[in-house]
């Protein structure tokens, strides 16, 4: 089963073993083997199938535009409007907004991850960096100790860059930035530092989708792979389940269109490993709450029908979901079957392989 960032975080809470934080003087929460991918290399020399390929951020650095991009991004922290919450707080002075992010980046874990979508994983895993805090306040958050309580360790941009290089040395196929939105300027700075030290694998921006399209434009020529959620299609659900974000559907849809403009459809290497492009996630929720039918219709009407779409089945009752009748249970087989069948009817032709396996399993279960 493809694991979402929610499920991965849940497992991370139990087994923080893959942390590479310790290598940078950052205390761990528990010990364990980091980077056990089996592929080793020296700094800046990834054993990658992408050796002839250049990530966007390296081209931007070569052409001289990266430094200014970082500066522009940091300017948005002074009266923070990095995301649609537009809190207006001065993040550079440590003021906090809805996301509760402190001035420095907080990382929960950095490790090879094998539960992401198959094109991100390859043989050596996706180089996942999990950031703490979040600009969405989902009542059903699967990682609330990290996203809501901010568990993790503060790191400098230099340390974050070193983590990225370590993941590359371990053979990871990409740097997968999980919940990056509220920390985008600091991450950009770290990517630039890492690039100058030899980072050369694709950069994946793995976001809950609550983005300002104007801010996403700052990532043009930096990010290679976008992996946004489109969680809800109705403002009322955004208001109720996302911590008062009725504008979520409009912002997420506009951001996804901007992402598509930048990177287009998913491109892979000869082994099926993602190099560039857009991959969208949508979680099926009980009682049709997440608007799956509207989701697939929107994708079909606004994006190429061959867009990579992962319709996920792993909703669980977490955090405060039990307080809301409609989402206080898991989905049933019929709810997932109808979701995939709607996607097929809409003409979506690039559905996630493991979602389709789940569909077959639910069909057998339903008889
Ligand atoms: S990133 Fe955080 S502080 Fe900035 S606007 Fe969004 S929620 Fe508010």
Image (cartoon, rainbow, N blue to C red):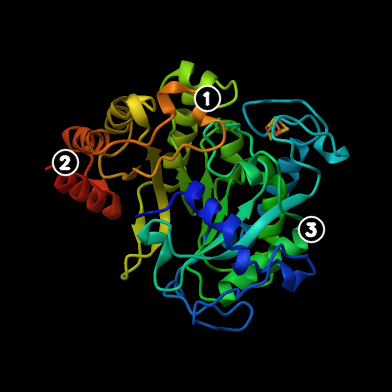
What whole-number distance in Å separates the C-alpha atoms at marks 2 and 1?
28 Å
Q: Is residue 64 visible?
A: no
What whole-number distance in Å separates the C-alpha atoms at marks 1 and 3?
38 Å
Going by the picture, which residue comes out furthest to the top?
A: 236
**Percent from the top left, x then y, of residue 70?**
71, 48
User: Between residues 43 and 63, which one lies in front from this camera angle?
Assistant: 43
Of the 4 image quadrants, the one containing the C terminus is top left
**Percent from the top left, x then y, of residue 97?**
75, 30
Q: Secondary structure at mark 3?
A: loop
Q: Secondary structure at mark 2?
A: helix
**Percent from the top left, x then y, of residue 305?**
25, 39
Instruction: Give the residue drawn at x 50%, y 77%.
Output: 37
Nearest to viewer (mark 1 / mark 3): 1
As drawn, 213 above or below 180: above
Where on the picture, by quarter, is residue 110? Answer: bottom right
Q: Earlier in the sequence, mark 2 or mark 1?
A: 1
Q: Quadrant of ligand 1?
A: top right
User: Between residues 148 and 206, which one lies in front from this camera angle?
Assistant: 148
Does label 1 point to a residue whose CB lies under 8 Å from ligand 1? no
- Where does label 3 land, which residue? 156
**Percent from the top left, x then y, of residue 261?**
43, 40
- Where does label 1 land, which residue? 323
- Give me the disc on residue 366: 2
Q: Earlier in the sequence, mark 1 or mark 3?
A: 3
Left or right: residue 198 versus residue 202 is right
Does label 3 point to a residue whose CB lies under 8 Å from ligand 1? no
Where on the picture, by quarter, is residue 31? Answer: bottom right
Q: Earlier in the sequence, mark 3 or mark 2?
A: 3
Left or right: residue 346 versus residue 154 is left
């Amino acid at each position: 089963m493809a694991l979402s960032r929610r499920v991965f975080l849940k497992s991370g809470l139990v087994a923080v073993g893959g942390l590479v934080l310790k290598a940078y003087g950052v205390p761990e929460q528990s010990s364990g083997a980091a980077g056990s991918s089996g592929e080793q290399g020296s700094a800046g020399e990834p054993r990658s199938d992408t050796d002839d390929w250049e990530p966007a951020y390296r081209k931007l650095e070569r052409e001289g535009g990266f430094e200014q991009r970082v500066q522009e991004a940091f300017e948005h922290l002074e009266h923070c409007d990095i995301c649609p919450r537009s809190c207006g707080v001065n993040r550079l002075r440590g003021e906090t907004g809805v996301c509760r992010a402190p001035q420095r980046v907080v990382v929960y874990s950095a490790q090879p991850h094998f539960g992401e979508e198959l094109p991100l994983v390859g043989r050596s895993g996706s180089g996942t960096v999990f950031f703490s805090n979040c600009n969405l306040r989902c009542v059903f958050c699967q990682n609330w100790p990290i996203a809501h309580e901010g568990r993790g360790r503060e790191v400098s941009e230099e340390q974050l860059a070193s983590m990225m290089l370590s993941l590359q040395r371990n053979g990871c196929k990409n740097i997968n930035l999980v919940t990056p939105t509220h920390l985008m300027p600091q991450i950009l700075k770290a990517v630039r530092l890492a690039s100058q030290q030899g980072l050369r694998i694709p950069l994946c921006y793995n976001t809950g989708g609550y983005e300002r399209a104007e801010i996403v434009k700052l990532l043009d020529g930096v990010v290679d792979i976008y992996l946004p959620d489109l969680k809800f299609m109705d403002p009322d659900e955004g208001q109720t389940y996302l911590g008062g974000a009725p504008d979520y559907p409009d912002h997420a849809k506009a951001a996804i269109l901007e992402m598509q403009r930048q990177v287009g459809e998913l491109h892979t290497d000869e082994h099926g490993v993602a190099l560039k492009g857009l991959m969208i996630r949508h979680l099926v929720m009980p009682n049709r709450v997440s608007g799956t039918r509207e989701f697939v219709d929107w994708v079909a009407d606004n994006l190429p029908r061959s867009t990579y779409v992962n319709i996920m089945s792993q909703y669980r009752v977490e955090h405060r979901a039990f307080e809301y009748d409609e989402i206080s249970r898991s989905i049933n087989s019929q709810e997932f079957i109808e979701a995939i069948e709607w996607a097929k009817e809409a003409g979506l032709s690039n559905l996630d392989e493991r979602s389709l396996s789940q569909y077959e399993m639910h069909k057998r279960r339903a008889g």
